[in-house]
Image (cartoon, helix red, strand yellow):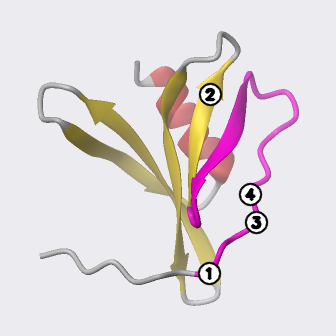
């Protein structure tokens, strides 16, 4: 069983200005990762751990009708790169 707690809205993660993607808020701690063509390539979820924030890269898979976690990272850029290169 997964318990989801209401979390405060976090500021959007800062990603490299050279990154070929943009972020669009989907929930208080969740952002859609959108490529240059306007396609959603996955989601970036912020997870507060002690005094730091980790970022989880998630991708929707139609075959299981749900999301798969691709990994957790200390850097939003690393999580975005995971989504970009794991196509």
With respect to residue 57, does 75 lie above or below? Answer: below
**Numbered label tally:** 4
Mark 2 and mark 3 in contact? Answer it, CB < 8 Å.
no
> What quarter of the picture does the N terminus occupy?
bottom left
User: Label 4: few (<14), some or many (≥20) within 10 Å?
Assistant: some
Sequence-first disc among 2 and 1 = 1
User: Label 1: few (<14), some or many (≥20) within 10 Å?
Assistant: few
Query: Secondary structure beneath disc 3?
Result: loop
Q: What stretch is highlighted in magenta?
A: 8-29
> What quarter of the picture does the C terminus occupy?
top left
Residue where numbered disc 2 is placed: 34
Q: Which residue is drawn at 49% across and 22% down?
A: 85
Q: How far apart are marks 3 and 1 (CA)?
A: 10 Å
Q: Residue 52 at x, y = what percent?
A: 63, 79
Say if the magenta span includes residue 36.
Answer: no
Residue where numbered disc 3 is placed: 11
Q: How far apart are marks 2 and 1 (CA)?
A: 23 Å
Q: Distance between the residues labelled 4 and 1?
A: 12 Å
Mark 4 and mark 1 in contact? Answer it, CB < 8 Å.
no
User: Label 2: few (<14), some or many (≥20) within 10 Å?
Assistant: some
Query: Secondary structure beneath disc 1?
Result: loop
In depth, the one of 17 and 66 nearer the eye is: 66
With respect to residue 20, does 4 lie above or below? Answer: below
Residue located farthest toward the right when viewing the structure as drawn: 17
Query: Secondary structure beneath disc 2?
Result: strand
Q: Residue 34 at x, y = what percent?
A: 62, 27
Q: Distance between the residues labelled 3 and 4?
A: 4 Å
Q: Quadrant of residue 50?
A: bottom right
Left of 19 or right of it: where is 32?
left
Q: Residue 31 at x, y = what percent?
A: 59, 49
Which mark identifies residue 8?
A: 1
Residue where numbered disc 4 is placed: 12
């Amino acid at each position: 069983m997964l318990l989801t707690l209401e979390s405060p809205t976090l500021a959007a993660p800062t990603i490299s200005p050279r990154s070929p993607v943009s972020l669009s808020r989907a929930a208080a701690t969740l952002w859609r990762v959108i490529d240059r063509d306007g396609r959603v390539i996955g989601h970036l979820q912020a997870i507060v751990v002690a005094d730091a924030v980790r970022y989880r890269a998630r991708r929707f898979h139609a075959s299981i009708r749900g999301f798969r976690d691709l990994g957790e990272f200390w850097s939003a850029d690393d999580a975005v790169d995971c989504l970009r290169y794991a196509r």
